[in-house]
Image (spheres, rainbow, N blue to C red):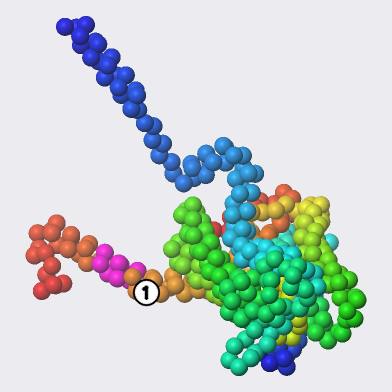
Amino acid sequence: MSRSNAARSKNIKSKVKQNSQVIDVFSTEQLIKAWEQKTGKETAELSGVVLRDGANYASAIVDSVTAVRMIKDLGINGRVSLKTVGTKQYVIFKGYAGIRSIFSSTRYLATNPKVVDMAIGRVGVNNSIVSGARLTIFLVVPLNILNHILSDQQTMTQLIGKTATDLVKVGVAAAIASLTATAVAAATTLVAGPLIVVIIVGLAVGLALDALDKQFGVTDALIKAMDKAFDSTVGEFARQLNKVERHLRWQAINGMPVGRGIFY
Amino acid sequence: MHKTTAHIILVLIDIAALFACYYVYSEYRDISSQLNELVESVMIQKPLGLYAVLVIVPAIHATAYIKIPDNRTKLVNRSFIMFFLMLIISAFVFDSWFDEKITESGYVYCEGMSESMRMSEFRVYLKEGLECTSQN
């Protein structure tokens, strides 16, 4: 009997061992520490910087790749001009079409997918700017949220305020870059000119907006205003609710009719 | 866009580019004088050098006015692209050189007091021996 019990217990133990799973529960601080220990502090910091910078410069990197592809196809002498015939705008490429692989014809409609994809002409440049801004937003917002989750010293208003000003900066930089690129496309014939201008003007405007934000404390002022608004509405409501609750509890403890003087 | 409007916009950007170059120079001069005065902390926007790359816009704008002979087009375009790449590389070299200059002057980067924004980081350097505390 005892032998069969021992065998059964051994069998159960081996089954439990086979199905065993280890669950580690970490706080965010412990998780970051564990990651730093595993990868080394410098690697962890570097990956953080690369992630943040990658998100900020993603649009510029994508545009640079397009500019290189364009110069490769059209050659260093690549020149392009815009011509409107009737209601339709055409993009006309100068040079020998036979040696080009992407633009194998001499003229295309400005809305042609090839032209739009390579960010040539007003439609192409605008499309490139909009998709670049969208890409930046898709990367910046989750990073801000991740940063908020990992940092225990940030409030929700800080996250909202920072994200709001970041989105405004993306929009302003994209608008100014778009305007400049359209002007370059209209004034010059250099094929890579508008795209180079989009990259540089976008970066410079982004930096300038950061400097202005720091100088005038726009983000901080927005966060303070949101904190104040939150405190005077939701905060005030919570305080009044707390006051009522304390009063009701006091009435209950002292054997008085609960809610008298408040509800009736 | 009408050509005149395009030129007016580009002239405005040209002026902004000149201001950007002056801003880089004045920041460099201010921080250098602060280092000489041995102030407790200095703050620098990074990457600072990228502002100066905006000078490419007046260069592109100039191509609209200059009539380049056909046999020189290739040379001019190559020089133009080389100039652009050189500007980008110079911007990053300038930033790392400036960082090194601050560090060699006896200052240490303080992460707690620095502030990261969308495109840039406002790096704070403290004089060696001073305590770096978090701003939060």
The answer to if B92 sits in the magenta stretch is no
Q: In the figure, B53 relative to A184: above or below?
A: above
Camera-side residue: A80 or A200? A80
Residue B109 placement (x, y as % from top left): 70, 53
Residue A46 horizontal side relative to residue A190, left or right: left
| Residue found at the very far front of the displayed protein | A98
Q: Amino acid at mark 1?
A: Ser
Q: Which residues are magenta?
A: A235-242
Question: Is residue A227 visible in this depiction of the protein?
Answer: yes
Q: Considering the numbered disc 1 on the image, is that residue within a helix, a strand or a loop?
A: helix
Camera-side residue: B94 or A195? A195
The answer to if A237 sits in the magenta stretch is yes
> Which corner quadrant holds the C terminus of chain A?
bottom left
Q: In the figure, A24 relative to A62: above or below?
A: above
Give the labeled residue for mark 1: A232
Residue drawn 63% across and 64% down?
Answer: A62
Q: 10 Å neighbourhood of mark 1: few (<14), some, or many (≥20)?
A: few
Which quadrant of the view contains residue A216? bottom right
Question: Is residue B16 visible in this depiction of the protein?
Answer: no
Camera-side residue: A220 or B131? A220
Residue drawn 50% across and 74% down?
Answer: A222
Residue drawn 20% across and 11% down?
Answer: A5
